[in-house]
Image: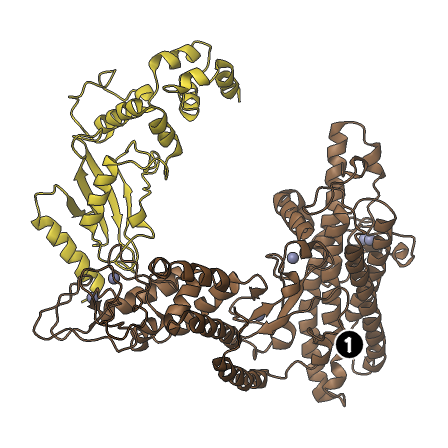
Amino acid sequence: MDARLRRVNKEISDCKADTSSGIQIELIDDSPFHLLGTFPGPEGTAYEGGTFKVDINIPDSYPFTPVKMKFITKVYHPNVSSASGAICLDILKDAWSPVLTLKSTLISLQSLLCSPEPNDPQDAEVAKHYVTSKTGFEETARYWTKVYAGAKDNIGVGKTAGGEDQIAIAGLEKAHVDQFEALGFPREQVIDVLRRLNYRGKNVSQISEDRIVEELLK
Amino acid sequence: MSDVEYSDDDYYDDEDMYDGTQDDADDDGMDMDNEDFQIDAGPKRKPYETEHESLSQAEVERLMRREIEQTRNILGTDESVAGLLLRHMSWNKERLIEQYMDNPSKLTDAAGITIPEPPSPASAAPVRSRSSRPSSKPLPHKRPSPSKKDEPFVCPICFDDAPGLETSGLDCNHQYCIGCWTAYLSSKIRDEGEHFIRCMAEGCSIVAPDCFVHASLLRDEPETWPRFKELLARHYVSCNPSLKFCPHPGCTNTVSCPGASSKSSLLSIVPTVSCGARGIPGQEKGPDSITVAREHKFCFGCPIDSDHRPVICNVAKMWMKKCADDSETANWIKSNTKECPKCNSTIEKNGGCNHMTCKKCKNEFCWVCMGPWSDHGTSWYSCNRYEEKAGIEARDAQSRSRASLERYLHYYNRWANHEQSAKLSLELYKKTEKKMEEMQITSSLTWIEVQFMKKAVEEADKCRETLKWTYAMAYYLCRGNHKELFEDNQRDLEHAVEELSELLEQPIESDTIPTLRQKVTDKTVYVSKRNEIVLDDTANGFLEGRWKWNVHVDGFDDPDPADLAF
Ligand SMILES: [Zn+2]
Ligand SMILES: [Zn+2]
Ligand SMILES: [Zn+2]
Ligand SMILES: [Zn+2]
Ligand SMILES: [Zn+2]
Ligand SMILES: [Zn+2]
C-alpha cells in the first residue's frame, strides 16, 4: 500500500482510539488527504469553552513536507490571521519533522492559543492590540470565542444580546466609536480606522483626534 | 593561513588539468567564428569588455574540493566535517578558522555535525551527540545497517514493521527505514532545493553528510544525486561575490568575474559576460539550432539576463522598472499594425526594417516616427533625438505631465521597436535560411558562401540590442554636448542597422546572390564598426566620469536642479 495512505489511515484510527485529548480528526469528503481537525480551546485562556475547527490538507510528499493547516473557526490571536485563518507556527514551516503527526500538530495549535508570540505575528493588528492592552485583547478574544467558536456566555462579555457586536469584534470601546460617528462618518468606517490605528488602552491618549479625522477623510 | 601549500593540493591540480582538457573536448566545435568570440583574451580586450572566465560545474566542484582540503588540513578534521563547516559558514574560510579555534564544539554544534574528540589515544573517543544514547562511530561512511533481527522495528514515520526492514540513521542514531530516508532527502532536495538537510527527528539538528545522502539515494533515486551536487555548487557560487551562476534555463555553468565583484565597480563598467554555451542544453542539435541557439550572455552585475551595454546596471534597472510601471500606457506601441500617414490604410510590419512602403499609395515613411523616409538618409534628420523644447515651454502642470509622457514614449517607442525588429528579422531569417539551403542543392554555391546572411542577421541583432539600451541611457542622460555626441553616434549606428536590415529583406535569387553577398558583407562590417564606436565611447565615458544624469542614480552625485528631468 502507498506509504502516505497507510500512515494517514493509521493516524486517523489512532486519533479515534484516543478519547482523552478531545482532539478529533474526520474526513471532509472522499479524500483521506483532506480532513477536518477539531480541538477544545485551552482551559484558563480566552479561548476556553470554544471548539476550534481546522482545515487539514495533506500534501503529496507528506510526511516529508509539513501538513497544511488553517483555522476554519475565526480566532482572535496574534499568530492567526483574523481574515483567512492562516497560522504562523514554526512546525508548519521549517521546524517540521516527519515524526510529527496530525494529532501532535493539532496539540501544538492548542498550545499556541495558550502562548501567543506577538513578536512573530501573522496578524499585525491583533498583535498590536495584544501588546498595547492585554486585558482589552483578552476581552476581544473571549468575545470572538463566544461568537465564532460557540462558547457559552458564562464569562460576562457580550454587550448586546444576540447578533454580533461589530465594536466588540474589533476590540474597541463603544464610546470612542460613538464619538466619531457623531461627526458624521459611517460607523463601519470609524470601526475600521480605529482598529487600524489601534485606538485602544494607552494609545488613546497618544493618538490625536485630528489624526483620526484625517484618516477618516482619506 | 590559507596560503600555506599542502602536498595534497598537487594531487588535485594534476586532476584539474586532466579534467580540463576533457571539458574542452566536449565543446562541439559547431561555432565557426570561435576566434571572434574569444571573451577572455586578455591583451586584446576592448574598453567595453570585462574579463571573465567560464567554469563548468566540475570545475566549480574542484574549487570547492580544494577549499575543503585546505580547511580540513588546517583544522585536522575529516573531509565531510570540513565541508559541512564551510557550508555552515557560507564558505568564509577565514572566519570559520577563527571561530573554530575559538570554540570548536560550539561551531560544530551549530553546524549540525557530530565530531570525534581530538586524538587522545587511550580514551574511547566518545561522540558528541544530542541523543541520550551515544552512538558507536560516525555511521555515514558505512552502508546503513539493518536493524537487529531480535528487536521488532516499526519505522516511526511510515509505520512499516516488516521483518528485516533496512534502517539507517545519522550520528544521533535516530533510526528510520531506508525508504523514508530516501523519500525525505529527495523531497528536501527536489521540492525545497535544500542541501543542508537535518535529521528527521523532531528538533534534532544533526545534518546529513554528503556520503549519507549519496548512500541513501543510490539505490532508489540515483537521479536525485546530481541535483544535490548542483545545489552544493550553486550554494558555493552564491557565497562567492566573484562568481555567478549562468541564469539561462537548464545551464549549469558558472562565470567568474572578479572585476565586477564590488558594487562600486558597477558604476563604471557593464560586466556583460557569457558562460560560453548556447541555446538550451539538450536541444543544441535541433533543426533551428543555428539561428535560435543564442549565446548565454548575461549581466554579472544585476539580474538582467541579456547584454544591456552600453548602460550601467543601476540605470538599466531604473529603466526596466519605469517600463514595468508604465506598461499600460505604452502597450499600444507594441501592436504590429499602424496606419499610413498619407492614405490611412492599414499597414502591417512583418520584417525588421523600419522603412515602410504603403502598398496602396506607395508612400514611404518611417515606422518609428511616421515621418517621410526620404529625410532619414540625411544626417540632419534625427529620428532618434527627442526635441525637449515642448517640455521647456510647457506652462501648466497638465501640459507638463503630457510632455513628460511624450518624452518617455519617444524613448520607449524606439526601445520597444528595436526589440521587436530583432524578433521579426530573426523570423524572416528562418525563412531565408531554408531558401539558402535549397539553393545549395540547386546551384553551385557552397555552404560557406551562403553563410553571409547568418553573420549579418547576428550582427544586426547584436546592434539592435545595443541600440535598445542606448535609448534607456539617453532617457536619463542630462542635456548637453556629451548627450548630443552620444546621440550622433546612436543615430549613425541606427542608420547603418536599418540599411543592413533593408538589404536582408531583399528577395534572394541564385543569380543575384554574388552582388547581394558583397553588399551585405560590406554593410555588416560597417555596422559592426559603428557598434564598436558606440560601445567604446560610452564605456570610456563611464571610466572618465563624463556621463551626467537627469535623475538621482545611486552612486552618482545628485544632478544640478537645472538638469533635472521635468
Ligand atoms: Zn519508514
Ligand atoms: Zn537525529
Ligand atoms: Zn549558460
Ligand atoms: Zn547589469
Ligand atoms: Zn498609403
Ligand atoms: Zn524615423
Residue at the (55%, 86%) spot, across then down? B22
Q: Where, by quadrant of the figure, is residue A48 drawn? A: top left
Q: Which residue is nearer to you in this view: B283 or B302?
A: B302
Q: Secondary structure at mark 1?
A: loop
Where residue A49 appears, as percent x and y from the top left, is 16, 30
Does residue B345 appear anywhere in the picture? Answer: no
Does residue B124 appear anywhere in the picture? Answer: yes
Q: Which color mode does the image show?
A: by chain
Left or right of residue B124, residue A65 in this image: right
Q: Is residue B189 above or below residue B69?
A: above
Q: Amino acid at mark 1?
A: Ile
Where residue B442 appears, as percent x and y from the top left, is 72, 88
Q: Mark 1 — residue?
A: B508
Left or right of residue B393, residue A61 in this image: left
Q: Which residue is nearer to you in this view: B374 or B301?
A: B301
Chain identifier for the yellow-coloured part of the image: A
Q: Is residue A138 above or below residue B377?
A: above
